Image: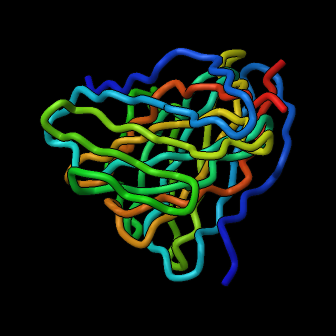
Amino acid sequence: ETGVTQSPTHLIKTRGQQVTLRCSSQSGHNTVSWYQQALGQGPQFIFQYYREEKNGRGNFPPRFSGLQFPNYSSELNVNALELDDSALYLCASSLLPQETQYFGPGTRLLVL
Amino acid sequence: QKEVEQNSGPLSVPEGAIASLNCTYSDRVSQSFFWYRQYSGKSPELIMSIYSNGDKEDGRFTAQLNKASQYVSLLIRDSQPSDSATYLCAVGGPGGQNFVFGPGTRLSVLP
């Protein structure tokens, strides 16, 4: 059974650019949640997908968007990058939305 | 706005002692509660989940939940230097779509 994987592991972008982060959920899991974790803070919920439908969204602007595919893998897209978008982006998968979430290794994004 | 608060750290305990980590939450309808451990530069890893009032034990870890007081805690017995990490409390609502994390408490276990 493979765990949650994310790509890339690290990324450097400049302000105004766009970025796509990818996540493969754990085998058998149909729910994927995305979080942003700034240095020294707890993860902040961006949104969740359950069976390809969005199942909730946190307080992030519309330039943060996502997608879940039929195999339950997921993408997080961020447009018009800002310096404050520099953070660790975490993907977590679960069997169902209300069940335990298991995290991938994260993608560290630096916006210059 | 749902809030989850944790005791401010860092918390330092000697090796072999009991470490006590506390968490309070604001949303009374919260139904699922989790403790994660996060080592520096790594992603969170699950320690324990708890859904019902009372205690739940797993090895050296005991989670305690009191929904009336909106309080959940984690006790680590026989603390080891390898337990030194940031501990995150997470709370889920009925639909599960919004896990709210606390800011974390940094624990240092001194040899």
Residue at 39% in and 22% down: B5
Location of residue A103 in the rendering, given as x and y in whole percent from the top left corner: 61, 56
Asked whether residue A81 appears in the rendered view, the answer is no
Residue A30 placement: quadrant: bottom left
Percent coordinates x, y for residue A88 in the rendering: 70, 35
Residue B58, position as x, y percentages in the image: 50, 62
Quarter holding the N terminus of chain B is: top left
The foreground one among A100 and A82 is A100
Q: Is residue B86 left or right of residue B67?
A: right
Q: Looking at the rendering, which quadrant does residue B56 occupy?
A: bottom left
Left or right of residue A20: residue B71: left
Looking at the rendering, in which quadrant would you find the C terminus of chain B?
top right
Q: Residue at x 67, y 18 (%)?
A: A82
Q: Is residue B16 left or right of residue A108?
A: left
Give the image quarter of residue A50. Answer: bottom left
Which one is in front, A2 or B45? B45
